[in-house]
Image: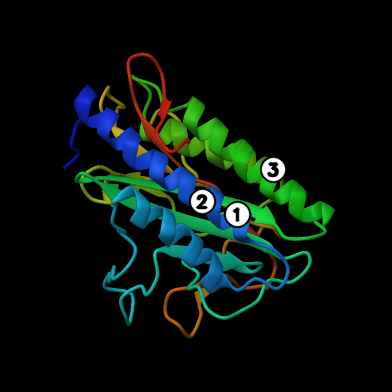
Amino acid sequence: MVEIKTDPQMDAMREAGRVVARALAAARDAAGVGVSLLDLDTAAHEVLRAAGASSPFLGYHPDFAPVPFPAVACVSVNDAIVHGVPDGYRLRDGDLVSVDFGAVLDGWAGDSAISFTVGRARSEDVRLISTAYEALEAGIAAATVGNRIGDIAHAIGKVCRGAGYGIPEDFGGHGIGREMHEDPGVPNEGRPGRGMVLRHGMVLAIEPMLIADGTDGYYPAPDGWTLRTVTGVRAAHAEHTVAITDSGPRILTLV
């Protein structure tokens, strides 16, 4: 069931989104050669605590996972696509990092992800990350009243496939509100004009994920959470929480 949010509820979600944006900025600012993934998680966690918000990631335990998620941020490096568990790995020159983060404030959730490089960036990584954000922007632009979920999916997929990148099978965005994951699902590839009609008050987490060599496969790492590319190539991830409004899409996860 899709919950339609009122305007005041969307405003409340905007405040949760600000916390998410500040935490992601803190994690990115903390990143550097020699910095551990745990340090990035700590930087994000400090923002969460200062805001009086809680984490929808910490302790999250879906059916597929062997253990609850042990951190407030997913930190995925190089061939890790999503759900990376922060650990003692220290970032190296040229690493590609994706950070996915959520916050719950006053009962409302926000969810967003960024990708960036550490140290000297490889040109192919710059293009991959740029395309992830281009796909995100295309998906957001399609998130208008009267359009359908398939229009968002098609817009994302067109950018990703057009650039020669792969799209992880079975992973995409989702509704969000009182819970981090709500209906409807938002695929990263699909046919326009199909799926649920978008209405004022729907709120979606739109999140393209790209695989550098055009393949779509992935496998779970031994931790049971991190998803890695089958061929070992790099991946990028970008995400915003977006409200569908009569005035156009409203991005809730900006500072």
Look at 45% across and 31% down and name the residue there. 151
Look at 51% across and 80% down and name the residue there. 221
Q: Position of residue 150 (x, y in %)?
A: 41, 35
Mark 3 or 1 closer to N-term?
1
Give left or right: position of 99 versus 121. Answer: left
Q: Secondary structure at mark 1?
A: helix
Toward the top, the furthest residue is 247
The mark tally for this picture is 3
Where residue 232 is drawn, which disc sits there? none
The residue nearer to you, when weighing 4 against 70, is 70
Report the residue marked by disc 3.
130
The residue nearer to you, when weighing 185 against 5, is 5
Circle nearer the viewer, 3 or 2 = 2
Distance from disc 2 to disc 1, alpha carbons, whole Å, reads: 6 Å
Where residue 24 is drawn, which disc sits there? 2
Rendered-image quadrant of the N terminus? top left
Mark 3 or 2 closer to N-term?
2
Look at 37% across and 75% down and name the residue there. 70
The residue nearer to you, when weighing 246 against 89, is 89
Question: Which kind of residue does numbered mark 3 sit on?
Answer: Ser
Distance from disc 3 to disc 2, alpha carbons, whole Å, reads: 17 Å
Give left or right: position of 170 versus 235. Answer: left
Asked if the residue under mark 1 is in contact with the one under mark 2, i.e. CB atoms within 8 Å, the reply is: yes
Q: Residues within 10 Å of mark 2 (few under 14, many from 20)?
A: many
Give left or right: position of 76 versus 202. Answer: right
Q: Residues within 10 Å of mark 3 (few under 14, many from 20)?
A: some
Q: Quadrant of residue 198?
A: top left
Toward the front, the furthest residue is 50
Question: Which kind of residue does numbered mark 1 sit on?
Answer: Arg
Distance from disc 3 to disc 1, alpha carbons, whole Å, reads: 16 Å
